Image (cartoon, rainbow, N blue to C red):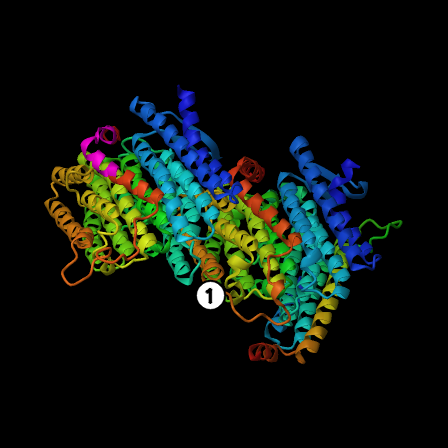
Amino acid sequence: MLSHLPILQVVVPLLAAPACLLLDRSRLVWIFTVLACGLSLLISMLLLYQVSQHGTLSYDLGGWDAPWGIEYRIDLLSAYVMLVVSGIATLVIVAAGTGLEREIPLEKQTVFYVTYLLCLAGLLGIVATGDIFNVFVFLEISSLATYALIAYGRDRRALWAAYQYLIVGTIGATFILIGIGFLYSLTGTLNMQDLAARIPDSAGSRTASTAFVFIVVGVCLKLALFPLHLWLPNAYAYAPSLVTAFLAATATKVAVYLLIRLHFSVFGEQFASSSLPLHGILLTLGLAGVFVASLVAIFQPDIKRLFAYSSIAQIGYMIIGIGFGTAIGLQATLLHLFNHALMKGALFLALAAVVYRLGSADISAFRGLGRRMPWTMAAIVIGGLSLIGMPLTVGFVSKWYLILAAIEAGMWPVALLVVTGSILAVVYVWRLVEAAYFQPPENELPEGLDGPDRREAPLTLLVPTWLLVLVNIYLGIDTRLTVGTSGAVASALLGGGQ
Amino acid sequence: MNLSVIGLMQAVLVIPLLAAAGVALTGMRPNLREGVSLVAGALLVAAVGLLYQAVMAGDRSGWTLLELLPGLTISFRLEPLGMLFCLIASFLWVVTILYAIGYMRGHGEANQTRFYALFAVAIASVGGIALADNLLTLFIFYEVLTLSTYPLVTHAGTDKARRGGRTYLGLLLGTSIVFFLPAIIATWALAGTLTFTEGGIFGDDTPPVLLSLLLVLFVFGIGKAAVMPFHRWLPAAMVAPTPVSALLHAVAVVKAGVFALAKVGVFIFGLDTLGSLAVTEWLLYLVAFGVLAASLVAMRQNNLKARLAYSTISQLGYISLGVLLATSAGLLGSALHIAMHAFGKITLFFCAGAILVASHKTEISDMRGLGRAMPLTMAAFFIASLSIIGLPPTGGSWSKWYLILGTLEAGQWLLMGVLMVSSLLNIAYLLPIPLKAFFPANGTAGYGSGEDSGIREAPLASLLAIMITTLMCLLLFFFPQPLYELARSIG
Amino acid sequence: MLPELYNYWVVILLMMTGFYIVIVQGNLIKKLIGLNLFQTSVFIFYISLGKVSGGSAPIFAEGVSSYSNPLPHVLILTAIVVGIATTALALALVIRIRNAYGTVEEEELQQRDLEC
């Protein structure tokens, strides 16, 4: 049983999804989904334990040997990403028990859970598989589920946002498909390890470079790297709040994982940096993303949209880390990948609580919220501090490594710009604090809500939020685990590429 | 010995936290609650007293609480400057609790449990600042202090209180994140360490331009030192209940600012490096301008607490100035002034609060003739004013003496002039208050003269606190040695 | 060069046509048609990759030594399924957009969002 864990990780949510349809009461479906997510969380914990004890796991699908059959390959990096993804998925789905009722009508909830599980299966599949075509398939499974999830939003603009994302996402995925085609025509293999072994033979070939460019552009569309980010703000702003929490914490992170995996494990740092001036491009785009997105975020009246732009900025930081091309830079990216999932998960869950109580995430809804929903607001403040990068939160750890990487690479201006970018985060977080703590609450109640409803959020929403907040703080103080792992992973990735 | 010293240091951090928990638990029974605070205060003073002896015996032990990232630790160390700060804060905490018992009950304030609990947390963070062994530890406790005192500032819960709190939080958090934290990161990048080290941590080859930039970042980033133009939070914080203004905004918070500045000056830059930077000179002039400007603004304030707040800004300027002079006398004067100003200013605030509780007056123009009704309070006000001005027989004369010596040592004649002029201004805005209270001009009826106006001295507990701090002002003139010796051993 | 590699030129032509339609067309349905063209070009690209000159269909038989590579074909079957799913989902979205807005023209959609 234990040896089948890599495939179970994907199969459990994948099979749980249609199974949901057999249960017709939405409460039952919810319990079933929580169990399925919990099970995949358990599996990812076991996998992480196995990987840390015995090293990389390889699982041949259907008993076919590796280069021919599909291989699932779990190393430390993928085990960690899977842990983050399934952990966040579980917390969000627990919160969905009550959080969903205001945003999705009861009769549609069963289908929602089905889509959610499919999305989870797709994301886990991308991380688990060692076969590059399999990556494409899982990417499309998760993407299709994502488009549907976004379209559940109450606002009709959610449909429009989902459509736009579908167009852009499909183009991105097709780009990746083209890249895979080139790679296959060049090397005759689809197994990532096999590819990594064969690509250096054809270094300098134009086919390899073209494949690389198509794949990188396609993945960057999925991870919303500036200036390919235009689909993200609308998608995050109009999707149901819990969907936003799930997507913001997992989907873009998995895309970043994919970029790292393909860049470092498949092509190798040497190939990537010699075939085109990738480092310069990534650094520039990352920095531009940080600044443009942070500046735009400052002026957003809708808080979900504000944090969506902030996500684009934070992805910018991750890309900067890759752009240094050094072990410590990559380590900063990995740290930020984990940490940003934690903070954005907490922030969007808290926003979901606000939307649950007030029916809106507009800045005007936040007026006086500091006293009406003290715990929710406290979670937002701590999440915001983490976003800024205050010491004792996880945000500090990743920013710190990013700055160390910049200094090590001798790029003083970059270090300075990273710090300046954080100051922009101060501004938009302060706007929230200002509204919640220093402005009197609006007198009139939003439509359809009566007085007693404007209390603190229910515990089912608060507990998952605060769990994430506490992890934010705990990992900000006890950094041995994350720093140690990311360091090991970074040097392994860079060592493997040479 | 070593172990027990570390144990005492841990006690300094833990006692107030335990007190906070105790206060929260005994919130239902006010007498027990205040008892917990007082006992904790007494224990803290005892622990600090023992630590004082250890410091004087040359003990410099420290310990690391945890390692955040490789090379980045949260650690603490015993050191004279921090000891001085600790000594003042812990002693005045007890006195302030005593005062607060009278004030809060006399004034009928709400949420007293929250008040005492957060007060204790603030004291714990002051302990952390005082004992910090590196910039990161200092920074963390600095922020905790801001956050824990914010609810105290907005205690009244009115719109005015919230506006004040907004300025308070905005300026203090803003400067610390925008200037202080980047300065710390840059320090790490340049020097590779954040640990406070005698003589500074920067190598000789560090470009002076970068160091100058860093110094500017530090001076403005430590917003609690209220260097102009980042001083606005201090008058804004005066909406807080008087015990808060007294301890936190005359002693703990602002002193945390100048203390951090002194730590940075002495142990990060080192006095030699500090004196050699061209930018220091400019910062000196900026600070000197602040000293004068704040004094002038203070003269125009009719609200007593506002006048005292601007006076605090001016006096903080003295301390920053002493550090930036980068001479041993200047530093000595600064360290002494941290103490002397603390005792003087807390007395003045206590008096202001006593007047408020007893007569519900906040405006200076209404206080004519109040001396007959509240003779003890007004006498205390007079003596404390002398100490702020720097006249014998009060402790303030020593610190001002060394500060002026410092300007002479550095050859800064102009600055000496500034200090002199500012002292004259101090006289002009402080002394008229008690004088007019005792000798109202003809034609205005004095309170308590003739028919009974109903105004009495403040509650006994508050009065006792006022007496203690006033006595300290006087005693420190005659027996400054303990503080002097401590200040001498800095750096 | 052109004659031997004509299959790739067809791919490029189809791809650019599809891409152009996706970008330029304001009608949501037409956008989808463009997207489909774009995807189809990649399908053809894969299929022509697997062709081996002179090779027979990949069915094991006596006397045949050269086979076309079946793997790209198998891969692209999967991709076609994915493409159909995408199109179906997109069409479903368009229907709901039409119900909610009363139009499937991009410009009118934006205008109606601005109005409210």
Q: Is residue B207 visible?
A: no
Determine whether A311 is above or below B253 in the image: below
Quadrant in the rendering for residue A41: top right
Mark 1 lies on residue: A299
Question: Which residues are the magenta region?
Answer: B471-485
**Residue beneath the point at 34% across and 25% down:** B60
**Residue beneath the point at 16% across and 38% down:** B393
Q: Quadrant of the N terminus of chain A?
A: top right
Determine whether B159 is above or below B3 in the image: below
Q: Secondary structure at mark 1?
A: loop
Q: Is residue A477 visible?
A: yes
Determine whether B304 is above or below A269 in the image: below
| Tally of numbered discs | 1
Determine whether B478 is above or below B181 in the image: above
Q: Quadrant of the C terminus of chain A?
A: top right
**Residue B176 or residue B296, whichever sits in front:** B296
Image coordinates of residue B183 in percent, x first then y, are 35, 45
